[in-house]
Amino acid sequence: MGGPGNPPEGSPEGAPGGGEDEYRSVVFDESFVRAARLQEFSAQERIADHAPAVRRRPPLRRGLSRQALVLVLLIAVAFGTAIYMGVRHPYQTPAARESVEPLRMTVIPLAPEGKVPGTADLANLYEHSPAAQFRTGAEGVPLPASRRTAHFSDSQVVSALSTAKDYIVRSALDPEVLTGGEVRAVRVLLDPEQLDQFDQSFTRPTADGRHAPTGWLVRFDPSRAELADNKVRVQGTLQAAEADASTLEVTADHTFVYALRATGSGSGGKDEVSLFTLRRELHFRFDRDDLRLHQAQLVVSYVQAGPLSCAEDSTNHLRPLLAGQTAKEGGPAGTDPYATGSATALCGTLATSAQPKV
Protein backbone atom coordinates (compact mmCIF):
# COMPACT_ATOMS: atom_id res chain seq x y z
CA MET A 1 0.00 0.00 0.00
CA GLY A 2 1.35 3.43 -0.94
CA GLY A 3 2.45 6.09 1.47
CA PRO A 4 0.32 9.02 2.56
CA GLY A 5 -0.50 11.58 -0.11
CA ASN A 6 0.35 15.24 -0.09
CA PRO A 7 -2.24 17.85 0.78
CA PRO A 8 -4.21 19.13 -2.22
CA GLU A 9 -2.61 22.57 -2.02
CA GLY A 10 0.94 21.35 -1.31
CA SER A 11 2.94 21.21 1.88
CA PRO A 12 2.01 23.66 4.62
CA GLU A 13 4.10 26.79 4.59
CA GLY A 14 6.96 26.62 7.09
CA ALA A 15 6.79 22.87 7.48
CA PRO A 16 10.21 21.24 7.82
CA GLY A 17 11.50 19.55 4.69
CA GLY A 18 12.84 16.08 4.05
CA GLY A 19 12.22 13.24 6.51
CA GLU A 20 13.32 15.13 9.61
CA ASP A 21 9.78 15.53 11.04
CA GLU A 22 8.42 12.19 12.13
CA TYR A 23 4.90 13.67 12.35
CA ARG A 24 4.90 15.12 8.88
CA SER A 25 2.87 12.24 7.48
CA VAL A 26 0.00 12.91 9.89
CA VAL A 27 -0.10 16.73 9.87
CA PHE A 28 -2.80 18.11 7.54
CA ASP A 29 -3.55 21.71 6.82
CA GLU A 30 -7.03 23.20 6.72
CA SER A 31 -7.36 22.93 2.94
CA PHE A 32 -6.69 19.21 3.11
CA VAL A 33 -9.38 18.76 5.69
CA ARG A 34 -11.93 20.78 3.71
CA ALA A 35 -11.21 18.77 0.57
CA ALA A 36 -11.79 15.41 2.29
CA ARG A 37 -14.69 13.43 0.88
CA LEU A 38 -15.26 11.60 4.24
CA GLN A 39 -16.02 13.36 7.51
CA GLU A 40 -16.02 11.71 10.95
CA PHE A 41 -19.16 12.16 13.01
CA SER A 42 -18.72 14.03 16.25
CA ALA A 43 -18.94 12.19 19.56
CA GLN A 44 -22.41 13.59 20.18
CA GLU A 45 -23.51 12.36 16.74
CA ARG A 46 -22.05 8.90 17.33
CA ILE A 47 -24.08 8.57 20.57
CA ALA A 48 -27.19 8.84 18.40
CA ASP A 49 -28.37 6.20 15.98
CA HIS A 50 -25.54 6.62 13.47
CA ALA A 51 -23.83 3.30 13.08
CA PRO A 52 -21.08 4.34 10.76
CA ALA A 53 -18.31 6.38 12.23
CA VAL A 54 -17.98 8.63 9.17
CA ARG A 55 -20.24 10.24 6.62
CA ARG A 56 -19.65 11.14 2.97
CA ARG A 57 -19.57 14.87 2.27
CA PRO A 58 -21.17 16.22 -0.87
CA PRO A 59 -18.67 17.40 -3.50
CA LEU A 60 -17.71 21.03 -3.36
CA ARG A 61 -19.68 23.20 -5.76
CA ARG A 62 -17.22 25.30 -7.66
CA GLY A 63 -18.95 28.37 -9.09
CA LEU A 64 -17.74 30.62 -11.90
CA SER A 65 -14.62 32.62 -11.21
CA ARG A 66 -14.83 36.35 -10.79
CA GLN A 67 -13.28 36.92 -14.24
CA ALA A 68 -15.84 34.67 -15.89
CA LEU A 69 -18.70 36.46 -14.17
CA VAL A 70 -17.37 39.83 -15.34
CA LEU A 71 -17.02 38.55 -18.90
CA VAL A 72 -20.58 37.19 -18.94
CA LEU A 73 -21.86 40.48 -17.56
CA LEU A 74 -20.04 42.51 -20.23
CA ILE A 75 -21.41 40.32 -23.01
CA ALA A 76 -24.94 40.72 -21.66
CA VAL A 77 -24.56 44.52 -21.44
CA ALA A 78 -23.16 44.73 -25.01
CA PHE A 79 -25.93 42.56 -26.41
CA GLY A 80 -28.60 44.61 -24.66
CA THR A 81 -27.05 47.85 -25.89
CA ALA A 82 -27.02 46.59 -29.49
CA ILE A 83 -30.71 45.71 -29.30
CA TYR A 84 -31.55 49.09 -27.78
CA MET A 85 -29.56 50.99 -30.42
CA GLY A 86 -31.30 49.05 -33.15
CA VAL A 87 -34.71 50.06 -31.85
CA ARG A 88 -34.01 53.57 -30.68
CA HIS A 89 -30.82 55.03 -32.14
CA PRO A 90 -29.62 58.52 -31.17
CA TYR A 91 -29.46 59.81 -34.77
CA GLN A 92 -32.32 61.78 -36.17
CA THR A 93 -34.17 60.23 -39.05
CA PRO A 94 -33.57 62.37 -42.15
CA ALA A 95 -36.50 64.41 -43.33
CA ALA A 96 -38.55 63.01 -46.17
CA ARG A 97 -37.14 64.06 -49.53
CA GLU A 98 -39.24 66.31 -51.72
CA SER A 99 -40.37 64.79 -54.99
CA VAL A 100 -38.15 65.62 -57.96
CA GLU A 101 -39.67 67.98 -60.50
CA PRO A 102 -40.04 66.49 -64.02
CA LEU A 103 -38.04 68.03 -66.85
CA ARG A 104 -39.76 70.77 -68.85
CA MET A 105 -38.29 71.05 -72.34
CA THR A 106 -38.61 73.28 -75.40
CA VAL A 107 -36.95 72.60 -78.75
CA ILE A 108 -37.25 75.41 -81.33
CA PRO A 109 -36.08 74.72 -84.90
CA LEU A 110 -34.52 77.66 -86.76
CA ALA A 111 -35.15 77.69 -90.51
CA PRO A 112 -32.65 79.35 -92.90
CA GLU A 113 -33.84 82.17 -95.17
CA GLY A 114 -32.06 80.74 -98.20
CA LYS A 115 -29.61 77.98 -99.09
CA VAL A 116 -27.38 76.61 -96.39
CA PRO A 117 -23.78 77.74 -97.03
CA GLY A 118 -21.12 75.06 -97.26
CA THR A 119 -17.62 74.31 -98.47
CA ALA A 120 -15.17 71.44 -98.66
CA ASP A 121 -12.62 73.51 -96.69
CA LEU A 122 -13.64 72.96 -93.06
CA ALA A 123 -11.00 75.30 -91.63
CA ASN A 124 -12.18 78.10 -93.88
CA LEU A 125 -15.78 77.40 -92.88
CA TYR A 126 -15.02 77.91 -89.20
CA GLU A 127 -12.80 80.90 -89.85
CA HIS A 128 -15.61 82.79 -91.56
CA SER A 129 -18.24 81.95 -88.95
CA PRO A 130 -19.12 83.48 -85.55
CA ALA A 131 -17.55 80.33 -84.00
CA ALA A 132 -14.04 81.25 -85.17
CA GLN A 133 -12.88 82.00 -81.60
CA PHE A 134 -14.79 79.23 -79.86
CA ARG A 135 -12.90 76.54 -77.97
CA THR A 136 -13.17 72.89 -78.90
CA GLY A 137 -14.79 70.11 -76.90
CA ALA A 138 -14.83 70.14 -73.10
CA GLU A 139 -12.40 73.08 -73.07
CA GLY A 140 -15.36 75.22 -74.11
CA VAL A 141 -17.17 74.32 -70.86
CA PRO A 142 -14.78 75.70 -68.20
CA LEU A 143 -15.72 75.66 -64.53
CA PRO A 144 -16.12 79.13 -63.03
CA ALA A 145 -14.46 80.22 -59.82
CA SER A 146 -16.65 78.77 -57.10
CA ARG A 147 -17.54 80.15 -53.71
CA ARG A 148 -19.29 78.58 -50.78
CA THR A 149 -22.85 79.63 -50.03
CA ALA A 150 -24.67 80.06 -46.74
CA HIS A 151 -25.49 76.35 -46.49
CA PHE A 152 -23.09 74.65 -48.94
CA SER A 153 -19.30 74.36 -48.80
CA ASP A 154 -16.82 75.11 -51.58
CA SER A 155 -16.46 71.41 -52.35
CA GLN A 156 -20.23 70.97 -52.65
CA VAL A 157 -20.52 73.89 -55.07
CA VAL A 158 -17.64 72.47 -57.13
CA SER A 159 -19.38 69.07 -57.13
CA ALA A 160 -22.57 70.62 -58.51
CA LEU A 161 -20.70 72.50 -61.25
CA SER A 162 -18.62 69.43 -62.16
CA THR A 163 -21.71 67.22 -62.48
CA ALA A 164 -23.43 69.82 -64.65
CA LYS A 165 -20.35 70.03 -66.87
CA ASP A 166 -20.19 66.23 -67.17
CA TYR A 167 -23.82 66.18 -68.25
CA ILE A 168 -23.20 68.86 -70.89
CA VAL A 169 -20.10 67.12 -72.26
CA ARG A 170 -21.77 63.70 -72.44
CA SER A 171 -25.08 64.93 -73.84
CA ALA A 172 -23.81 67.40 -76.44
CA LEU A 173 -20.17 66.53 -77.25
CA ASP A 174 -19.86 62.73 -77.18
CA PRO A 175 -19.76 61.49 -80.82
CA GLU A 176 -21.57 58.26 -79.88
CA VAL A 177 -24.45 60.27 -78.40
CA LEU A 178 -24.51 62.75 -81.29
CA THR A 179 -24.87 59.98 -83.87
CA GLY A 180 -28.02 58.62 -82.20
CA GLY A 181 -26.63 55.52 -80.51
CA GLU A 182 -25.47 55.96 -76.90
CA VAL A 183 -27.84 57.21 -74.16
CA ARG A 184 -26.64 55.38 -71.04
CA ALA A 185 -23.71 57.74 -70.52
CA VAL A 186 -26.23 60.55 -70.05
CA ARG A 187 -28.79 58.51 -68.13
CA VAL A 188 -26.42 57.56 -65.28
CA LEU A 189 -25.98 61.24 -64.35
CA LEU A 190 -29.69 61.81 -63.69
CA ASP A 191 -31.47 61.62 -60.37
CA PRO A 192 -33.20 58.20 -60.11
CA GLU A 193 -36.62 59.84 -59.83
CA GLN A 194 -36.24 61.22 -63.38
CA LEU A 195 -35.27 57.92 -65.00
CA ASP A 196 -38.85 56.87 -65.80
CA GLN A 197 -39.40 60.13 -67.67
CA PHE A 198 -36.06 59.74 -69.46
CA ASP A 199 -36.78 56.14 -70.50
CA GLN A 200 -40.29 56.97 -71.70
CA SER A 201 -38.86 59.80 -73.82
CA PHE A 202 -36.84 57.27 -75.81
CA THR A 203 -39.32 54.40 -75.93
CA ARG A 204 -42.37 56.59 -76.70
CA PRO A 205 -41.13 60.04 -77.82
CA THR A 206 -43.84 62.69 -77.86
CA ALA A 207 -43.85 66.42 -78.59
CA ASP A 208 -45.58 67.25 -75.30
CA GLY A 209 -42.82 69.30 -73.68
CA ARG A 210 -41.92 66.36 -71.42
CA HIS A 211 -40.85 63.39 -73.55
CA ALA A 212 -38.62 64.53 -76.43
CA PRO A 213 -35.20 62.85 -76.66
CA THR A 214 -33.77 66.08 -78.11
CA GLY A 215 -34.72 67.81 -74.87
CA TRP A 216 -32.39 65.50 -72.92
CA LEU A 217 -29.47 65.36 -75.35
CA VAL A 218 -28.26 66.36 -78.80
CA ARG A 219 -28.51 63.77 -81.54
CA PHE A 220 -28.76 63.93 -85.31
CA ASP A 221 -30.71 61.65 -87.60
CA PRO A 222 -27.99 59.16 -88.63
CA SER A 223 -29.76 58.49 -91.93
CA ARG A 224 -29.35 62.12 -92.92
CA ALA A 225 -26.19 63.62 -91.44
CA GLU A 226 -22.90 62.63 -89.86
CA LEU A 227 -20.11 64.52 -88.12
CA ALA A 228 -17.44 65.91 -90.43
CA ASP A 229 -15.34 66.81 -87.38
CA ASN A 230 -15.52 65.37 -83.86
CA LYS A 231 -14.07 68.58 -82.42
CA VAL A 232 -17.24 70.50 -81.68
CA ARG A 233 -16.85 74.24 -81.10
CA VAL A 234 -18.33 75.48 -77.80
CA GLN A 235 -18.76 78.72 -75.89
CA GLY A 236 -20.87 79.50 -72.83
CA THR A 237 -21.17 79.90 -69.09
CA LEU A 238 -21.97 77.96 -65.92
CA GLN A 239 -23.38 79.63 -62.81
CA ALA A 240 -24.19 78.17 -59.39
CA ALA A 241 -26.49 79.64 -56.75
CA GLU A 242 -28.22 78.48 -53.59
CA ALA A 243 -31.99 78.08 -54.04
CA ASP A 244 -32.64 77.30 -50.38
CA ALA A 245 -30.97 75.66 -47.39
CA SER A 246 -31.17 72.20 -49.01
CA THR A 247 -30.85 72.94 -52.73
CA LEU A 248 -28.19 74.20 -55.13
CA GLU A 249 -29.05 75.32 -58.66
CA VAL A 250 -26.75 75.50 -61.68
CA THR A 251 -27.62 77.35 -64.88
CA ALA A 252 -25.78 76.41 -68.07
CA ASP A 253 -25.98 78.52 -71.24
CA HIS A 254 -23.87 77.31 -74.18
CA THR A 255 -23.69 77.58 -77.94
CA PHE A 256 -22.45 74.52 -79.84
CA VAL A 257 -21.33 74.50 -83.46
CA TYR A 258 -21.16 71.16 -85.33
CA ALA A 259 -19.58 70.47 -88.71
CA LEU A 260 -21.89 68.13 -90.67
CA ARG A 261 -22.01 66.42 -94.04
CA ALA A 262 -24.44 64.07 -95.74
CA THR A 263 -24.41 60.52 -94.42
CA GLY A 264 -22.24 58.20 -96.50
CA SER A 265 -20.57 60.99 -98.46
CA GLY A 266 -17.14 59.96 -97.13
CA SER A 267 -14.21 62.08 -96.02
CA GLY A 268 -12.33 62.50 -99.28
CA GLY A 269 -12.39 66.27 -98.97
CA LYS A 270 -14.61 66.94 -102.03
CA ASP A 271 -17.97 66.85 -100.28
CA GLU A 272 -19.26 70.10 -98.92
CA VAL A 273 -19.53 70.58 -95.17
CA SER A 274 -21.95 72.91 -93.41
CA LEU A 275 -22.23 74.20 -89.87
CA PHE A 276 -25.09 73.46 -87.50
CA THR A 277 -25.57 75.81 -84.53
CA LEU A 278 -27.38 74.93 -81.32
CA ARG A 279 -28.05 77.25 -78.39
CA ARG A 280 -28.88 75.32 -75.23
CA GLU A 281 -29.91 76.55 -71.79
CA LEU A 282 -30.14 73.97 -69.00
CA HIS A 283 -31.24 74.38 -65.40
CA PHE A 284 -29.96 71.81 -62.92
CA ARG A 285 -30.99 71.25 -59.32
CA PHE A 286 -29.01 69.40 -56.64
CA ASP A 287 -29.90 68.27 -53.14
CA ARG A 288 -27.30 66.76 -50.81
CA ASP A 289 -27.98 63.22 -52.02
CA ASP A 290 -27.36 64.33 -55.62
CA LEU A 291 -24.09 66.00 -54.64
CA ARG A 292 -22.91 62.89 -52.82
CA LEU A 293 -23.86 60.52 -55.66
CA HIS A 294 -22.65 62.74 -58.54
CA GLN A 295 -26.07 63.03 -60.16
CA ALA A 296 -28.36 65.88 -61.15
CA GLN A 297 -31.97 66.87 -61.50
CA LEU A 298 -32.46 68.45 -64.92
CA VAL A 299 -35.56 70.65 -64.57
CA VAL A 300 -35.45 72.96 -67.63
CA SER A 301 -34.08 72.40 -71.14
CA TYR A 302 -34.47 75.19 -73.70
CA VAL A 303 -32.98 74.57 -77.15
CA GLN A 304 -32.77 76.64 -80.36
CA ALA A 305 -31.15 74.86 -83.28
CA GLY A 306 -30.65 75.28 -87.01
CA PRO A 307 -30.60 75.16 -89.90
CA LEU A 308 -33.73 72.98 -89.59
CA SER A 309 -36.96 72.85 -91.49
CA CYS A 310 -40.01 73.83 -89.46
CA ALA A 311 -41.99 71.25 -91.42
CA GLU A 312 -39.89 68.42 -89.98
CA ASP A 313 -40.34 66.83 -86.58
CA SER A 314 -37.37 67.45 -84.27
CA THR A 315 -38.73 65.46 -81.33
CA ASN A 316 -36.74 62.24 -81.69
CA HIS A 317 -33.78 63.37 -83.83
CA LEU A 318 -32.52 66.64 -85.23
CA ARG A 319 -32.77 66.50 -89.05
CA PRO A 320 -30.41 69.26 -90.16
CA LEU A 321 -30.45 70.98 -93.53
CA LEU A 322 -27.04 70.51 -95.14
CA ALA A 323 -24.92 72.51 -97.57
CA GLY A 324 -26.98 73.82 -100.50
CA GLN A 325 -30.37 72.77 -99.06
CA THR A 326 -33.29 75.06 -98.30
CA ALA A 327 -36.12 74.79 -95.81
CA LYS A 328 -39.33 73.13 -96.97
CA GLU A 329 -42.38 75.29 -97.25
CA GLY A 330 -44.93 75.12 -94.51
CA GLY A 331 -44.56 74.87 -90.79
CA PRO A 332 -45.47 72.62 -87.93
CA ALA A 333 -48.78 70.84 -87.90
CA GLY A 334 -51.63 72.84 -86.40
CA THR A 335 -51.68 73.01 -82.62
CA ASP A 336 -54.84 73.14 -80.56
CA PRO A 337 -54.32 75.66 -77.74
CA TYR A 338 -57.22 74.08 -75.83
CA ALA A 339 -55.46 70.71 -75.67
CA THR A 340 -53.40 70.70 -72.49
CA GLY A 341 -51.64 67.43 -73.34
CA SER A 342 -49.38 68.92 -76.03
CA ALA A 343 -47.06 71.87 -76.22
CA THR A 344 -47.57 74.75 -78.63
CA ALA A 345 -45.40 74.29 -81.72
CA LEU A 346 -42.69 76.92 -82.15
CA CYS A 347 -40.36 77.74 -85.01
CA GLY A 348 -37.96 80.57 -85.72
CA THR A 349 -35.78 81.95 -88.47
CA LEU A 350 -32.04 81.43 -88.50
CA ALA A 351 -30.42 84.84 -88.99
CA THR A 352 -28.07 85.18 -91.94
CA SER A 353 -25.42 86.64 -89.63
CA ALA A 354 -25.37 83.36 -87.65
CA GLN A 355 -24.08 81.40 -90.67
CA PRO A 356 -20.61 81.35 -92.21
CA LYS A 357 -19.91 83.72 -95.09
CA VAL A 358 -18.47 81.49 -97.82
Image (cartoon, rainbow, N blue to C red):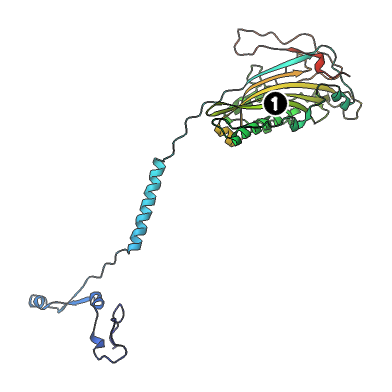
Asked whether, in this view, residue 182 is left or right of residue 240, the answer is: right
Residue type, mark 1 in image: Thr
Image spot of residue 133 (x, y percent):
81, 26
Above or below — where is 165 with respect to 65?
above
Quadrant for the C terminus, please.
top right
Query: Which one is nearer the viewer's eye here, 133 or 228?
Result: 133
The x and y percentages for residue 191 are: 59, 30
Q: Report the side of 189 relative to 67 (left or right).
A: right
- The answer to whether 328 is drawn above or below residue 193 in the figure is above
| Residue marked by disc 1 | 237
Residue 262: x %, y % from top left: 84, 23
Q: Work out whether residue 331 can be spotted.
A: yes
Residue at x 24% of width, y 82% of height: 28
Residue toward you, 261 or 264 = 261
Residue 349: quadrant of the picture:
top right
Secondary structure at numbered mark 1? strand
Residue at (79, 20) in percent of width and height: 320
- 41 vs 329, left or right, is left
Specify the quadrant of the image occupied by residue 111. Answer: top right
Pointer 1: residues within 10 angstroms few (<14), some, or many (20+)? some
Residue 312 versus residue 262 in the image, above or below: above
Task: Tell me which corner region of the image, top left, top right, bottom left or bottom right, holds residue 149.
Answer: top right
- At a point 65% along the width and 19% down the height, the residue shown is 105
Residue at screen point 61% across, 9% down: 339
Q: Position of residue 310 (x, y in %)?
A: 75, 13
